[in-house]
């Protein structure tokens, strides 16, 4: 079987990703906004924007969606630390019919695309 034949069949497949889900945070810095720390005098560089995306199992799910897998489901646990109000959405939308299901303590939240 060739690579093209394998990739063509991805649209007919379903996948379930079970595992840890974390929120990756990416910061963009601007050195021109640097100012010295009051405590140490070491320059602090200002954050000018922040982006978030699902990490760990979320990255796997987004990669499967980007490869064209027909249906992707994610099942995992989200901790109560960090930013619990930040929406769980990734750079690659999951295919139609796919969904996120996550548990945060005793409450459940899901995001559908």
Image (spheres, rainbow, N blue to C red):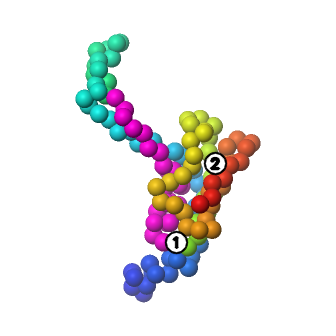
Under circle 2, the secondary element is: strand
The residue lying at 63 percent from left, 68 percent from top is 97
On the image, the x and y values in percent for residue 71 come to: 58, 70
Taking the magenta stretch, the answer to whether it contains residue 51 is yes
N-term-proximal mark, 1 vs 2: 1
Q: Which mark is residue 3?
A: none
Residue 71 visible (yes or no): yes
Residue under circle 2? 77
Left/right of residue 67 with respect to residue 86 in the rendered view: left
**Marks 1 and 2 in Cβ contact (< 8 Å):** no
Residue 37 figure quarter: top left
Residue found at x 59% / y 54%: 19
Q: Quadrant of the N terminus?
A: bottom left
Furthest toward the bottom, the residue is 1
Residue drawn at x 66%, y 53% as measured from the top left: 110
Q: Residue at x 55, y 35 (%)?
A: 82
Label 1 to label 2: alpha-carbon separation: 23 Å
Work out whether 102 lies above or below 84: below
Query: In the rendered view, does 5 fall on the left or right side of 41?
Result: right
Q: Which mark is residue 69?
A: 1
Above/below status of 13 relative to 80: below
Name the one closer to the observer, 39 or 90. Answer: 90
Q: Specify few, some or many for label 2: CA neighbours under 10 Å numbering under 14, 14-19, or 20 or more.
A: some
């Amino acid at each position: 079987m060739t690579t093209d034949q394998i990739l063509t069949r991805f649209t007919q497949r379903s996948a379930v990703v079970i595992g840890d889900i974390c929120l990756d945070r990416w910061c963009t810095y601007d050195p021109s906004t640097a100012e010295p720390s009051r405590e140490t005098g070491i320059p602090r560089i200002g954050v000018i924007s922040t982006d978030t995306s699902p990490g760990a199992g979320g990255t796997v799910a987004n990669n499967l969606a980007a490869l064209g897998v027909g249906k992707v489901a994610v099942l995992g646990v989200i901790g109560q630390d960090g930013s619990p109000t930040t929406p769980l959405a990734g750079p690659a939308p999951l295919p139609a019919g796919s969904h996120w299901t996550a548990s945060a303590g005793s409450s459940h939240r899901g995001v559908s695309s």
